[in-house]
């Protein structure tokens, strides 16, 4: 569901003949032409409530890289998980994987991958 919301939002914010501005986003009223079409498309794609949709639109309009960062991180963690599952076979434990990912706190994705790799060899 979250992926559908992100995809719908990213598509929506580039609809119409004029893409959403990438600069000057703090200019008053810049979002107004996009708000209603965005809410409609996201609602159709996700079935989410209007309040939730409006909240997401506001969040991504002031923090546009967040959606990209979320997906990059998610994909990196899923790759690390798949690699660990292949290396460990039946020994793979989802709780153990989770602990390996979060125990060290916020780390660069490359470091997280190394931690998971070391955990899967143990």
Image (cartoon, rainbow, N blue to C red):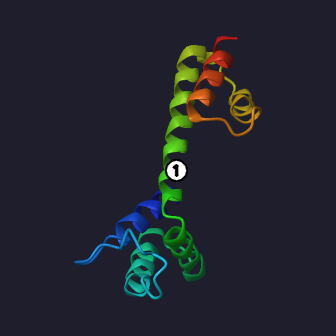
Helix, strand, or loop for circle 1? helix
- Identity of the residue drawn at 46% across and 76% down: 43
Residue 91 visible in rendering:
no
- Identity of the residue drawn at 43% across and 82% down: 31
Q: Quadrant of the C terminus?
A: top right
- Identity of the residue drawn at 52% across and 36% down: 76
Could you say where residue 70 lies in the image, as x and y percent from the top left? 54, 51
Residue 8 visible in rendering:
yes
Rendered position, 66 above or below 40: above
Rendered position, 64 above or below 30: above
Q: Is residue 32 left or right of residue 2?
A: left
Picture quadrant of residue 56: bottom right
Mark 1 nearby-residue class (10 Å; few <14, some 14–19, many ≥20): few
Q: Is residue 51 left or right of residue 96?
A: left
- Identity of the residue drawn at 74% across and 32% down: 95
Could you say where residue 4 lies in the image, as x and y percent from the top left? 45, 60
Picture quadrant of residue 54: bottom right
Q: Which residue is mark 1?
A: 69
The one nearer the camera, 69 or 9, is 69
Could you say where residue 28 lies in the image, as x and y percent from the top left? 48, 87
Q: Is residue 99 left or right of residue 70?
A: right
Could you say where residue 107 lies in the image, as x and y percent from the top left? 66, 35
């Amino acid at each position: 569901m979250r992926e559908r919301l992100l995809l719908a939002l990213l598509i929506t914010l580039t609809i119409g003949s004029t893409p959403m501005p990438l600069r000057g986003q703090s200019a008053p009223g810049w979002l107004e032409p996009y708000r209603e079409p965005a809410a409609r498309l996201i609602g159709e794609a996700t079935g989410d409530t209007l309040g939730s949709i409006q909240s997401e639109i506001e969040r991504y309009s002031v923090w546009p890289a967040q959606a990209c960062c979320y997906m990059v991180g998610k994909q990196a963690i899923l790759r690390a998980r798949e690699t660990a599952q292949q290396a460990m076979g039946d020994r793979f434990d989802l709780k153990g994987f989770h602990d390996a990912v979060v125990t060290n706190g916020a780390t660069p994705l490359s470091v997280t991958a190394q931690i998971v790799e070391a955990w899967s060899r143990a």
